């Protein structure tokens, strides 16, 4: 069932692009050939990489050549440019790994293959070939918040509860097979976007599970929302059971191994399924352990130990399935924190004070606000 669904989602695509050749000049009259057309990649809202494949099934895109200079038309006609429409969030990478451009806004464009100049005195009136090479279109979702967690933790359930999205939810791991973005709306019509991602497993950074392929989608989010199951996680009877705290450390480690910079993003931990028996005791222990993270890290076995600890802005205990109030708290806290971090980015001078305030708020909030 699901594999098929996953196969449909394309977030990377190679295209061969070629600019048109310049037209031939006309030495007798000093006539200049028309320049070849160029190929551009342009971001368009609502477009997918699948649409690109549909429009260019051969994955080869070529612009037309410039017209030759003729006695009746001394300046050759320019070739026609071609634009390839791609989704917003695409980076264009060439075969040497160089980034040719990031298409982060609707309408932004990158020249990927320049047409050749027309024949003129400097090239002995021979039009030049256009540029030709293969580029990779690499799509990374753009969302305010990225949901990160092991499979079956309740990420999709939470997204469904705070947004208008209706993701698939089921009681087995890897229900979500492709990333999707849901919109969270507030009464004043403010909106946030939240990306629901397939669950991570141990070794995701090394491409275990759906791994790497989807971790890139959190790179452009502003805040990570880590969701863990209060009772922990076990992928299969062949795998070890991981406690709630272990899953937090493992997520920290996987993010770090994938890209250390991800740990610099603001992050919130959501401990889900608080309706299950035993969850309260777990929460108490997890909070106590997280309060002394350095001490904890010194103790845990290496397979669980990240080099660097995530900076958690908050720890929220919820039941995504059965406690609407707890879900609302997540919804509002996300907004608050995104605003706070946006202010900090705008005014770095204030950052230190606010960080200090945050820290003291965290220490003060031993109980009530965290359910
Ligand atoms: N008891 C309880 N079950 C929950 C809660 N939230 C989610 N679940 C259940 O946990 C299971 C997994 O939920 P999903 O939302 O599909 O989990 P996910 O994290 O999106 O899982 P993947 O897509 O596989 O990564 C489903 O059976 C949910 O009904 C909760 O608060 N309490
Ligand atoms: Mg899911």
Image (cartoon, grey):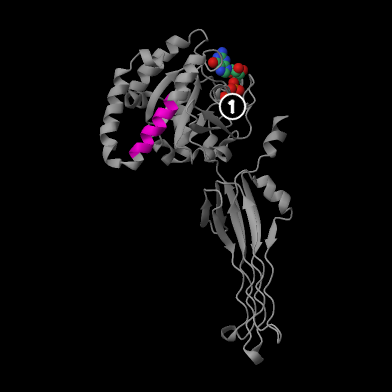
Q: Is residue 305 visible?
A: no
Neighbourhood count class around disc 1 (C-alpha, 10 Å): few under 14, some 14–19, many 20 upward = few
SS at circle 1: loop
Residue 165 versus residue 323 in the image, above or below: below
Q: Quadrant of residue 117?
A: bottom right
In the figure, is residue 166 to the left or right of 202? right
Q: Position of residue 57 (x, y in %)?
A: 74, 53
- Is residue 338 on the magenta stretch? yes
Q: Quadrant of residue 74?
A: bottom right
Q: Quadrant of ligand 1?
A: top right
Q: Which residue is mark 1?
A: 164
Q: Image point 40% across, 18% down: which residue? A: 286
Magenta stretch in the rendered image: 333-344
Q: Position of residue 194 (x, y in %)?
A: 52, 32
Q: Quadrant of residue 163?
A: top right
Q: Position of residue 140 (x, y in %)?
A: 55, 43
Q: Position of residue 90 (x, y in %)?
A: 56, 48
């Amino acid at each position: 069932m699901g594999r098929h669904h996953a196969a449909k989602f394309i977030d990377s695509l190679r295209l061969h692009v070629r600019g048109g050749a310049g037209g031939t000049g006309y030495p007798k009259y000093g006539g200049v050939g028309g320049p070849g057309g160029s190929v551009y990649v342009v971001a368009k809202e609502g477009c997918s990489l699948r649409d690109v494949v549909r429009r260019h099934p051969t994955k080869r895109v070529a612009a037309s050549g410039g017209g030759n200079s003729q006695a009746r038309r001394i300046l050759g006609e320019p070739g026609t440019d071609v634009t390839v429409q791609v989704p917003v969030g695409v980076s264009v990478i060439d075969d040497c790994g160089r980034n040719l451009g990031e298409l982060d806004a609707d309408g932004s464009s990158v020249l990927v293959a320049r047409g050749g100049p027309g024949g003129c005195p400097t090239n002995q009136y021979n039009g030049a070939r256009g540029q030709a090479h293969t580029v990779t279109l690499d799509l990374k979702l753009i969302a305010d918040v990225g949901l990160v967690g092991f499979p079956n933790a309740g990420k999709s359930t939470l997204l469904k509860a705070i947004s208008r999205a209706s993701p698939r939810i089921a009681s087995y791991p890897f229900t979500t097979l492709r990333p999707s973005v849901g919109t969270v709306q507030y009464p004043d019509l403010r909106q946030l976007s939240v990306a629901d991602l397939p669950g991570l497993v141990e070794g995701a950074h090394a491409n275990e599970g759906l791994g790497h392929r989807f971790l890139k989608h959190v790179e452009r989010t502003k805040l990570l929302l880590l969701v863990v199951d209060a009772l922990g996680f076990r992928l299969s009877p062949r795998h070890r059971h991981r406690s709630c705290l272990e899953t937090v450390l493992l997520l920290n480690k996987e993010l770090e191994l994938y890209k250390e910079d991800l740990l610099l993003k603001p992050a919130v931990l959501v401990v889900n399924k608080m309706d299950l028996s035993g969850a309260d005791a777990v929460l108490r222990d997890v909070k106590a352990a997280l309060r002394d993270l350095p001490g904890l890290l010194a103790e845990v076995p290496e397979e669980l130990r990240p080099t660097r600890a995530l900076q958690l802005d908050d720890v929220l205990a919820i039941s995504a399935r059965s406690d609407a109030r707890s879900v609302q708290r997540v919804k509002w806290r996300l907004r608050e924190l995104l605003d706070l971090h946006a202010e900090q980015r705008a005014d770095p001078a204030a950052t230190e004070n606010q960080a200090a305030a945050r820290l003291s708020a965290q220490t003060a909030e031993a109980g009530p606000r965290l359910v």
